[in-house]
Image (cartoon, rainbow, N blue to C red):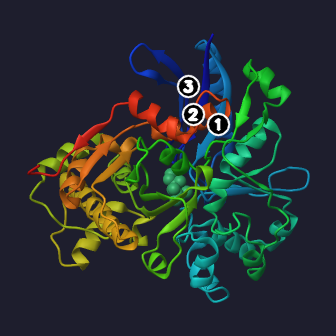
Amino acid sequence: MKKCHLAVDIGASSGRLMAGWLEETATSGSVMKLEEIYRFTNGMIKKNNQLIWDMDHLYSSIIAGIKESVNKGFKAVSLGIDTWAVDFVLLDEDDNLLTDAVAYRDSRTDGVMEEVFKTVSKEDIYERTGIQFQPFNTLYQLVALKQSNPAVLHKAASFLMIPDYLNYLLTGVKTNEYTNATSTQFVNVQSNKWDEELLEKLDIPTDMFHDIQLPGTILGALRPEVAEEVGTQLDVVLPATHDTGSAVVAVPENKETIYLSSGTWSLLGIETTEPIASEKALSYNFTNEGGMDYRYRFLKNIMGLWMIQEVRRLMDDRYSFAEYVTLAQEAKEFSSVVDVNDNRFLNPDNMIEEVKAYCKETQQPVPETPGEIARTIFLSLAKSYSKTIKEIEQLKHVTYDQINIIGGGTKNELLNELLAEESGKTVVTGPVEATAIGNIVVQMIVEEDLKDLKEARDVIRQSFDIKDYRPKGE
Ligand code: LFR
């Protein structure tokens, strides 16, 4: 049996289990190997007029994936789960589910953020938490729930975010992991603890929250009945359970660099040891999400490849993502641009119509063909990345010469080239599997196969395909 660590990495449209292990080479020391074990679908479903995540499906897929690792001859020493952020479930005192896992794109938070500002100012919230304002942050989801169903909040004995809940089902241990907890916008950026004062101002009960635990904690073994079902026993470890946290762990650089974690969302920023919650950072709406070893991800959420995912879905998957890239390359004369961070693109009824309407309202040529629509989206993303980089440089008084793109979006060569052109900087892409890799290296650090984050990043750089794009003329 081959020893490995398992990453369960679940995104908004799919999830998978990846096995990772180290191999000694004659020339370059340890290299990391990665194999996909099991893949499953994910997506928002409608229930009682709300968009929710199907937690039973996610849990049974994890179980099927662990079984598959055994079938494939692996002995997993440990397993870590990461998912998107902000969403949660509530349990009662007998650990029964009180709520569905409502998805952050559901409309229940429409207008709630603005209402909250009447009780607690924007400045106060930012000073306490350092987290960017997004209508779907957990803070506003809880206020929305309080308005629609106050009784449920008072009955709640446990608040668990998506990975916390899956960890609980596997181990029976209830906890809140730090990197994901910060995405709620009610963890205090100074104390790194729940900001109970903020919650009390909004009349949200505080006794349902657990102690916050850091990535790198061993949560516990599988419950005996789970171990029996999957045919193996292992440690469940906390990686950075927020997927962006895991992805940034895998940026293959030990120097300060700009990174862009590119997937459904585009998360662009830098890693810092101190949060930057200044007035200027607030005005640009930057976040300071908690990371491994109390490093902060000073970044901005940019709407990301969700826009093209929606276009693809609306066109019944007629073209693959790679084909959209080719079609957009062919439409090279088309240069209309939309503000990708306008909330109208968060969950419109029809993304294609929304992009067209924006162009029309702003007196630009309206994209008609699939290639023109794709080009508008990619060009708009590249321009938004470039603008965000300038904001960071202004805030930090530093000029960066390189951008590291990680994640599935690195496969979009047009976007990589457009970013190199727009920014005038060298774009370095890879690894594609950053999130799973970041998840696994934290498990390796726990098991002392790797010393620390620095060594992990050196090993990642040696192990995976990393590519350079230079701006034209260089
Ligand atoms: C990316 C991500 C972002 C978060 C968004 C919503 O997958 O986790 O970091 O802002 O999803 O949870």
Residue 88 percent across, percent down from the top left: 69, 56
Q: Nearer the viewer, residue 400 or 66?
A: 400
Residue wearing tag 3: 19
The relative height of residue 348 versus residue 427 in the rendered view (above or below) is below
Tell me if residue 369 can be seen: no
Pointer 1 local density, CA inside 10 Å: few below 14, some 14–19, many at least 20: many
Name which quarter of the figure residue 122 lies in.
bottom right
Badge 2: residue crowd in 10 Å (few <14, some 14–19, many ≥20):
many
Quarter holding the N terminus? top right
Numbered disc 3: secondary structure: strand
The Cα atoms of the two marked residues, 3 and 2, are separated by 8 Å
Q: Which numbered disc flags the more N-terminal residue, 3 or 2?
A: 3
- Identified by mark 1, the residue type is Gly
Does residue 321 show up? Answer: yes
Q: Are marks 2 and 1 in contact (CB under 8 Å)?
A: yes
The percent position of residue 423, horizontal first and vertical second, equals 23, 60
Q: Nearer the viewer, residue 188 or 36?
A: 188
User: What residue would you read off at disc 2?
Assistant: 440
The quarter of the displayed image where residue 77 is located? top right
* Rendering coords of residue 382 (x, y %): 27, 59
**Amino acid type, residue under disc 2 in the picture:** Ile
Dot 2 falls on a residue whose secondary structure is helix
Residue 135: image tag: none
Q: Earlier in the sequence, mark 3 or mark 1?
A: 3
Q: Mark 1 = which residue?
A: 80
Left/right of residue 184 with respect to residue 133 in the rendered view: right
Residue type (three-letter) at the residue carrying disc 3: Ala
Neighbourhood count class around disc 3 (C-alpha, 10 Å): few under 14, some 14–19, many 20 upward? many
